[in-house]
Image (cartoon, helix red, strand yellow):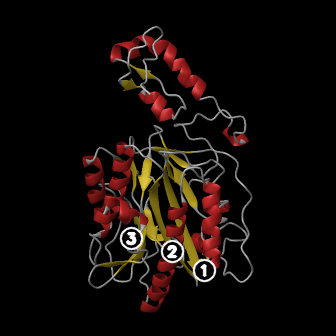
């Protein structure tokens, strides 16, 4: 069916769609025959946007009067899931405070060089972590809630005899992070159904035999527009380019130069307030791995270093803000963000990606 111009009395065939209506994902976006009609009707049409931005009645109490940067809104969060007896717990699983992580003085702590035995344990853990993320990614589809994805992730981790590292970490209430559209990272799974055109990042971390393993991917939900696809592809490529640099003697600070150069060339920006990190017996430790250029990261890579690289690439500004839930980081301009992450170890000849993809995995099918 041909769309007609939304300007009163015009009724000519429409050629343009209001970009604000598209950004707000309104159910009935307005169309116009020309820029002239659009500008003439704008004083009245913008009131339609305000109506579309009315907050839902079930908005969590801490969000009352909060000025959102984009169209995404939080919904109900279910109670924290239980972990059965027999699963090895983290030191924060009960009290929420990562005692060992706090005790480690990152300002003076050297980067840990892991033994071959420790690396083998993390290699097995990385494979398990990849299995869990692939299960979640293959399940994600229009109509499913991120709460349902969290159930899938939680159960898959428990079935493998591991603990979901995010669960109760500084009181984080879920077993994985699900970051939609303008959410950069640390999104809390809730009961909002996924919509056609969403981009969804699922971040999974497992704790097993005293070690953590961390990875994430961004998934295309339904029919994503070309700009969104390009953003996701750019984030994927940024991670691959950075991994290709990793070898003994490479400087941590130089990864950000490569990542930002590629992102900027594609017309995107790089988040500065969240970085990659060392990982192993601690969820987060040295080294710090910034993804932006001209950073001041300290040190060179050595055999046995284990860390994550996880560039967050934004459609608009690199700047962020945190929702009142104290976790969800969103873009300051409400535009979309995409991210990919791997855990890797430095070897004599370069690096090994411990959370590497299996043949035919979701991202390889779409971007290889």
Locate residue 31: give its quadrant.
Answer: top left
The reply to whether discs 3 and 2 touch (Cβ–Cβ < 8 Å) is: no
Locate residue 94: give its quadrant.
Answer: bottom right
- How far across and how far down the image is residue 45, in percent? 50, 17
Q: Mark 3 points at which residue?
A: 360
Is 10 located above or below residue 174 in the figure?
above
Q: Which of marks 1 and 3 is in front?
A: 3
Q: Name the residue under label 2.
A: 131
Q: Earlier in the sequence, mark 3 or mark 2?
A: 2
What whole-number distance in Å separates the C-alpha atoms at marks 1 and 3? 22 Å
Query: In what quadrant of the picture does the N terminus appear?
Result: top left
What whole-number distance in Å separates the C-alpha atoms at marks 3 and 2? 13 Å
Is 224 located above or below residue 255 in the figure?
above
Assign a secondary structure to mark 3.
loop
- The total of numbered circles placed on residues is 3
Q: Earlier in the sequence, mark 1 or mark 3?
A: 1
- How far across and how far down the image is residue 130, in percent? 48, 73
- How far across and how far down the image is residue 236, in percent? 35, 59
Residue reaching furthest to the front: 1
């Amino acid at each position: 069916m041909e769309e007609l111009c939304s300007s009163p009395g015009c009724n000519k065939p429409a050629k343009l769609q209001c970009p604000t209506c598209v950004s707000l994902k309104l159910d009935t976006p307005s169309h116009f025959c020309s820029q002239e009609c659009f500008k003439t009707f704008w004083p009245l049409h913008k009131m339609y946007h305000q109506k579309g931005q009315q907050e839902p009645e079930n908005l969590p109490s801490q969000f009352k009067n909060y000025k959102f940067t984009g169209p995404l809104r939080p919904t109900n969060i279910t109670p924290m899931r239980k972990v059965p007896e027999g699963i090895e717990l983290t030191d924060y699983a009960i009290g929420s405070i990562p005692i060992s992580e706090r005790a480690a003085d990152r300002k003076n702590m050297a980067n840990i060089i892991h033994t071959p035995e420790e690396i083998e344990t993390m290699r097995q853990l990385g494979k398990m972590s990849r299995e869990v993320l692939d299960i979640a990614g293959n399940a994600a589809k229009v109509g499913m809630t991120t709460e349902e994805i969290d159930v899938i992730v939680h159960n898959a981790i428990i079935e493998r005899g591991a603990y979901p590292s995010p669960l109760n970490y500084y009181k984080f209430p879920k077993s994985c992070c699900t970051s939609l559209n303008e959410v950069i990272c640390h999104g809390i799974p809730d009961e909002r159904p996924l919509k056609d055109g969403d981009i969804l990042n699922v971040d999974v971390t497992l704790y097993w035999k005293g070690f953590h393993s961390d990875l994430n991917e961004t998934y295309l939900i339904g029919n994503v527009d070309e700009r969104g696809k390009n953003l996701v592809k750019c984030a994927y490529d940024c991670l691959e380019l950075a991994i290709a640099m990793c070898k003994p003697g490479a400087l941590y600070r130089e990864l950000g130069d490569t990542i930002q150069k590629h992102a900027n060339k594609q017309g995107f920006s790089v988040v500065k307030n969240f970085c990659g990190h060392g990982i192993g017996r601690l969820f987060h430790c040295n080294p710090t791995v910034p993804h932006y250029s001209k950073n001041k990261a300290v040190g060179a890579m050595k055999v046995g270093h284990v860390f994550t690289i996880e560039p967050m690439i934004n459609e608009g500004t690199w700047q962020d803000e945190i929702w009142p839930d104290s976790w969800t980081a969103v873009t300051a301009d409400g535009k979309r963000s995409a991210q990919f992450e791997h855990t890797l170890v430095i070897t004599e000849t370069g690096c090994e990606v411990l959370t590497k993809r299996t043949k035919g995995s979701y991202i390889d099918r779409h971007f290889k």
